[in-house]
Amino acid sequence: MMFQASNRSGSKILPFFIIATGMSLMSSLAHAATAQPYASIGSFATLPAPGPAIPDRSLVPGKQYSHRFDENSIGVADPMQVIDWDGIGGVQDGPDFSPLFASDHEIDGIANNQDTLFNSVKANTSALLFSVENDGSIYSESVTHTPGVWATPPVINSMHPPKDVDGLQVWDGATNRYSLLGDPGGVSVYNDLGGAMITTVDIATAIGQPNLASSIDLDALMVNGNNLLFSIAPVAGVFDGGEIWSWDGVNPATFLNHGGHVWDTAHCVACDLGLASENINALEAVSAVPVPAAVWLFGSGLLGLFGLGRQKKYQG
Ligand SMILES: [Ca+2]
Ligand SMILES: [Ca+2]
Ligand SMILES: [Ca+2]
């Protein structure tokens, strides 16, 4: 409103740079304490079906991210706060797990206990989403290996663009599994009640390196019951952090086979997209978005109007 007033009163004499400076100043002031409002796109009557489509991020419901370091939707440091994002720059505070812990920790991986598309991304019938360390964008890999940028920092949070997305969750908007930075106390995955579910010993054993338990820091995950897709922070001389393992909770973990290649240590994560880091620190999956119930109603309403119009025309 302030900009409109000043623009109106002096639009013909103000050089562009003054207007631009004013906008920049207002933008800076806005950055200090506000967030673009979160625009919910509603719920879906059906879950997305597995498939190769990579929809625009604004069409996918229930998106949440964790910032490194944890902050709230207006960019203020806030340990264990997860942020809801709408895909057009709007955000709001999501779940905050800090009340469950006696001291502050940093969340470095988020998931739902029944992650949508878990089985299909594991079977390479849906696209993979990921982010890497010190990077505020989210990237995609199609089922045929085509790399892409799914969301840039301003699209994720227009007022406080993330510097590093270190946890990602989509579809259900219900983060209830997470990992903490450094896996303190030897715990790699917690539940929504703050209970330890999977330990660093479990992970080290699953990936065939039981002696590395004290070096394990799980930093990206998807969950489906007892099944996990996960990455870990780099372990010097052993793992570069770009590995993605699939684990059923019982048998030895195996490297994810997605996009026509294996996500093992030899695979160069940074190469396809020219990324600065090889370390994957967020994981998710997408496929075609089901048509929301509201759109069906709207569509049938339009059809009804169209039918009525035609009917009248024919009658006349
Ligand atoms: Ca975080
Ligand atoms: Ca961790
Ligand atoms: Ca990693």
Image (cartoon, rainbow, N blue to C red):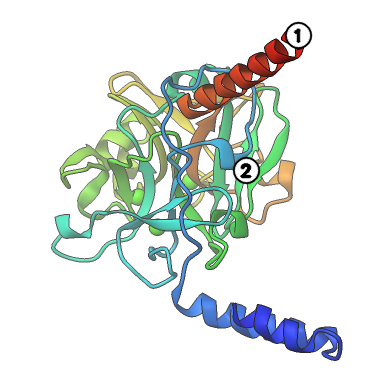
Q: Residue at x 15, y 43 (%)?
A: 195
Sequence-first disc among 1 and 2: 2
Q: Quadrant of ligand 1?
A: bottom left
Count of numbered circles in the view: 2
Q: What label does residue 139 carry, if any?
A: 2
Q: Secondary structure at mark 1?
A: helix
Front one among 174 and 274: 174
Q: CA distance from mark 1 to mark 2?
A: 52 Å
Q: Residue at x 30, y 59 (%)?
A: 80
In this picture, residue 218 sits left or right of residue 51: left
**Residue type at the position of mark 2:** Tyr
State the image coordinates of residue 255 (x, y, percent, origin top left): 50, 27
How far across and how far down the image is residue 227, in percent? 34, 24
Image position, residue 211 (x, y; %): 31, 41
In front of the other: 301 or 241: 301
In the picture of the structure, the residue carrying the numbered disc 1 is: 314
- Give the quarter of the figure containing the N terminus: bottom right
Question: Quick check: 153 left or right of 314?
Answer: left
In the picture, the quarter occupied by the C terminus is: top right
The residue located at (39%, 31%) in the rendering is 207
Measured as percent of width and height from the top left, residue 179 is found at 32, 47
Type of amino acid under label 1? Tyr
Query: Along the line of sight, which residue is nearer the eye, 174 or 66?
Result: 174
